[in-house]
């Protein structure tokens, strides 16, 4: 069984660089694998261990400038290989910087078709930076395959995927023939952590880099990312527990919350 | 301008109609409802006869869009709605903006605002409004004034084949009151050692007339509270008058769901917990020692005000 996993190099949420005007400085913010895409890789590795076959990672670098991001990007791909993927195929192209899943799904669908045939396509439910929650669905349209989103448990029986979808109000159990696409939630598994040594050992596994060959449609947008900051009083009450409790109740009365 | 609004269940359609009515004069709905709801605010409604799965909806919505040729497509941001419309947008090769909280016009552009980076930042995107665009709007952001238009109903009768079979649906347990509507919310986190201890939080909530919400692990990992109590970027966003975070560290993904609260109180035993940066009032204490004292203090206050009022 051949499995393709899609991972995004997301802005690192714990290292966001903020300029003095509250704007996020993308150029100075490092990138890492997006949280739920780790679950996607982990699920792929588990299925590969059970059913054999090849596990291939796909990614497109979408944050720039390329020279400042390529080292982190490379490291992310190595991490995926160290977790158990066999090879990585990556799009690195000036034309893909600052794109959304509208464009990346088209570019990656084209790349997948070039690389080979897969029985299953896995990705995270959404990326942790731009969280547009559409990549899997769009990919399904471009590859003309069925998609099962928000999967928190997955089984394979006789060439069929049986998946539990985690929705707002209900859990659904659905069934679908392969090939198909699934997006997984953070609850599906615990991604293994890899050591620096394992990452180095994965050096022998291939990473193939591509430019885009033909232009993909691209939507022109201007954008700005600004930190949300709401001023808070930041008062810490000091004293014995009883005193502090009284101060808190007093403050709530003064604020008009308690009457 | 013509907009197609979609929701796989009619009860979630209002928010989408809210945005659509501000950017277009003709609104075509596509939905399904079980009960005798009275659709309004639409010129035309394509209505499914039965519940459909996402795969079938995609073919139907796509076909209707080919006939109607809308300028815009709007849906309300729920997992299934976003999945269906994203697939339709893939086929139509148009962009979709997810989780939109604001949209304004600026000459020939739309300025679309949506939270990103785990809710820490706002993404303001300027895009040519003459393009065909799709929006998935956040619940409770776009007001819907009871427009009196009564739509012409067109039943969706055709059978569409589906590649995905629905085998089972299990309803998730639900809290009685929607946490988004609560004026006071007590939030519980991993600082609580076990489910039974949550009774401290419930007792406090009762005194304050508050609802109890929680961080992701308390619901998703431990299952101590239903999913609809889970606050944060991957679940509910709330804007109550008062939010009290107890034993919650203040991860950005949690803050995203509560940062618009009127007043924020944090109770945490670690004085360096990030939650204090987002709080108006902070108490550095072990919740197991502090909550019983706070509860007693509140009871005293309530009793004395009763005495004062002569009840
Ligand atoms: C993509 C993504 C999406 C996410 N979405 C969400 C989301 O929507 N909502 C969400 O909440 N999280 C979300 N998370 C998880 C988030 O990152 C945190 O892991 C989570 O919020 C932590 O929950 P917590 O504060 O309850 O637990 P912890 O971080 O473990 O904090 C527990 C706190 O309790 C304090 N404490 C311990 N014992 C006591 C005591 N006896 N008395 C007082 N204080 C005590 C500790 O000092 C600590 O600060 C998401 C994560 C990712 C990666």
Image (cartoon, helix red, strand yellow):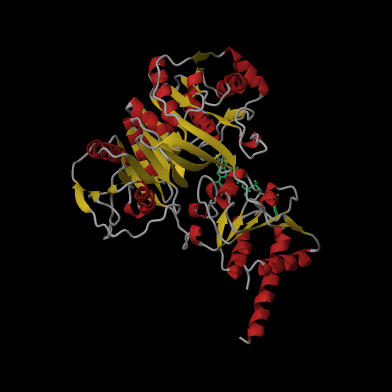
Position of residue A39 measured from the top left corner of the image (x, y, whole percent):
52, 33
Spot the residue most to the right.
A239
**B105 left or right of A204 in image:** left
Spot the residue most to the front.
B107
Q: Quadrant of the N terminus of chain B?
A: top left
Nearer to us in this view, A134 or A160:
A134
Position of residue B127 measured from the top left corner of the image (x, y, whole percent):
43, 35
Q: Residue at x 41, y 42 (%)?
A: A165
Vertical comparison of B130 with B146: above or below: above
| Marker count (numbered) | 0
Nearer to us in this view, B154 or B103:
B103
Which of the 4 quarters of the picture holds residue A205?
top right
Vertical comparison of A115 with B73: above or below: above
Q: Residue at x 61, y 35 (%)?
A: A24
Q: Residue at x 32, y 31 (%)?
A: B91
Nearer to us in this view, B121 or B230:
B121
Position of residue A21 measured from the top left corner of the image (x, y, whole percent):
64, 39
Q: Residue at x 49, y 57 (%)?
A: B180
Q: Quadrant of the C terminus of chain B?
A: bottom right
- Can the viewer see residue A156 in this picture? no
Vertical comparison of A45 with B150: above or below: above
């Amino acid at each position: 069984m051949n499995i393709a996993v899609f991972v995004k190099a997301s802005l690192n949420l714990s290292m966001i660089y903020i300029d003095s005007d509250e704007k996020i400085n993308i150029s100075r913010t490092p990138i890492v694998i997006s949280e739920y895409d780790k679950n996607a890789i982990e699920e792929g590795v588990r299925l590969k261990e059970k059913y054999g076959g090849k596990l291939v990672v796909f990614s497109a670098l979408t944050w720039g400038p390329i020279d400042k991001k390529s080292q982190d990007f490379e490291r992310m791909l190595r991490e995926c290989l160290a977790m158990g993927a066999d090879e990585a195929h990556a799009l690195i192209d000036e034309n893909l910087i600052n794109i959304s899943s509208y464009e990346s799904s088209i570019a990656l669908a084209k790349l997948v078709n070039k690389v080979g045939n897969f029985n299953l396509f896995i990705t995270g439910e959404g990326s942790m930076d731009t969280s547009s929650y559409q990549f899997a669905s769009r990919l399904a349209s471009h590859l003309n395959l069925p998609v099962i989103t928000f999967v928190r448990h997955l089984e394979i029986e006789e060439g069929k995927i049986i998946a539990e979808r985690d929705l707002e109000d209900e859990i659904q159990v659905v069934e679908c023939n392969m090939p198909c696409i699934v997006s997984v939630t953070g609850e599906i598994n615990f991604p293994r952590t890899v050591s620096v040594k394992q990452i180095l050992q994965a050096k022998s596994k291939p990473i193939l880099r591509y430019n885009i060959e033909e232009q993909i449609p691209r939507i022109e947008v201007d954008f700005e990312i600004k930190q949300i900051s709401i001023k808070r009083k930041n008062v810490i009450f000091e004293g014995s527990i009883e005193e502090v409790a009284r101060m808190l109740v007093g403050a709530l009365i003064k604020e008009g919350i308690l009457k | 301008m013509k907009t197609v609004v979609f929701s796989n269940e009619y009860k979630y359609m209002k928010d989408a109609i809210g945005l659509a009515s501000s950017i277009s004069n003709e609104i075509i709905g596509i939905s399904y409802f079980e009960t005798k709801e009275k659709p309004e605010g639409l010129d035309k409604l394509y209505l499914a006869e039965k519940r459909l799965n996402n795969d079938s909806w995609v073919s139907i919505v796509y076909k209707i869009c080919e006939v109607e040729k809308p300028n815009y497509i709007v849906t309300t941001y729920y997992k299934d709605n976003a999945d269906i419309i994203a697939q339709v947008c893939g086929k139509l090769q148009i962009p979709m903006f997810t989780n939109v909280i604001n949209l304004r016009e600026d000459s020939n552009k739309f300025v679309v605002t949506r939270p990103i980076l785990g809710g820490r930042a706002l993404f303001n995107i300027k895009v040519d409004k003459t393009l065909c665009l799709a929006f998935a709007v956040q619940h409770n952001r776009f007001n819907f004034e009871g427009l009196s238009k009564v739509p012409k109903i067109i039943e969706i009768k055709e059978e569409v084949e589906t590649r995905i079979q629905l085998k089972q649906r299990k309803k998730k347990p639900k809290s009685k009151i929607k946490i988004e509507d609560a004026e006071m919310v007590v939030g519980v986190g991993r600082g609580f050692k076990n489910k039974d201890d949550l009774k401290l939080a419930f007792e406090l909530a009762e005194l304050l007339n508050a609802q109890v919400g929680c961080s992701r692990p308390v619901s998703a990992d431990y299952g101590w509270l239903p999913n609809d109590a889970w606050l944060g970027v991957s679940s509910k966003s709330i804007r109550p008058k008062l939010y009290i975070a107890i034993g919650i560290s203040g991860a950005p993904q949690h803050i995203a769901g509560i940062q618009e609260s009127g007043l924020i109180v944090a109770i945490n035993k670690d004085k360096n917990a990030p939650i204090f940066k987002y709080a108006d009032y902070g108490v550095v204490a072990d919740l197991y020692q502090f909550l019983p004292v706070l509860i007693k203090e509140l009871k005293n206050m309530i009793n004395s005000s009763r005495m004062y009022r002569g009840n």
